[in-house]
């Protein structure tokens, strides 16, 4: 049973940084992609960032490009999302997700496993 556990969310002022972590356990295979999505109140879940597990290629939504950075620690089976220059519009629940079968990094439907989410609230 694959389990993804996010941590690192919280309340922040605009302009500061937060780092989210996603620890994967119970996985006996190599994933294709690990991704971060977010969902703001009243909005659909949207892609934020993803990383290719084998080659470490990274992908970002235009709204976070240049401010957010995704990375991974193979030994710890952990993926990170470094969020810099936070804006109030970054307020959302952030979800970590595991894609085991495709390279469609921005499609939530292609991800097989999801974490429980961590709240990020950015005040102006």
Image (cartoon, helix red, strand yellow):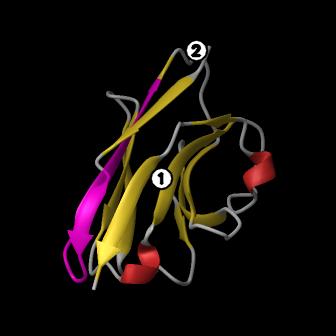
The image shows residue 85, relative to residue 77, as above or below, that is below
Q: Nearer the viewer, residue 106 or 89?
A: 89
What residue span does the magenta drawing correspond to? 9-24
Tell me, for residue 28, which label it has, or none: 2
Of the two numbered discs 1 and 2 in the rendering, the one whose residue sits closer to the viewer: 2
How many numbered badges does the structure rendering display? 2
- Asked if disc 1 and disc 2 are in contact, CB closer than 8 Å, the reply is no
Residue 94: say if magenta: no
Tell me, for residue 72, which label it has, or none: none
* Residue 55 in the figure: left or right of residue 7: right
Q: Is residue 55 visible?
A: no
**Helix, strand or loop for disc 2:** loop
* Residue 34 in the figure: left or right of residue 84: right
The dominant secondary structure in magenta is strand
Mark 1 = which residue?
A: 56
Mark 1 is surrounded, within 10 Å at the Cα level, by few (under 14), some (14 to 19) or many (20 or more) other residues, namely some
Q: Residue at x 48, y 64 (%)?
A: 92
Q: Quadrant of residue 115?
A: top right
The image shows residue 112, relative to residue 88, as above or below, that is above
């Amino acid at each position: 049973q694959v389990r993804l556990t996010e941590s690192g969310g919280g309340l922040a002022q605009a302009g500061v940084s937060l780092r989210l972590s996603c620890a994967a356990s119970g996985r006996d295979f190599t994933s294709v992609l690990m991704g971060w999505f977010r969902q703001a109140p009243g909005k659909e879940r949207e892609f934020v960032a993803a990383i290719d597990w084998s080659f470490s290629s990274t992908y970002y939504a235009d709204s976070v490009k240049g401010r957010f950075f995704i990375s991974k620690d193979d030994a710890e089976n952990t993926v990170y999302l470094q969020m810099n220059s936070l804006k109030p519009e970054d307020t959302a629940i952030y979800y970590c997700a595991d894609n085991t079968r495709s390279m469609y990094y921005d499609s939530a439907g292609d991800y097989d496993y999801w974490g429980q989410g961590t709240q990020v609230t950015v005040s102006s």
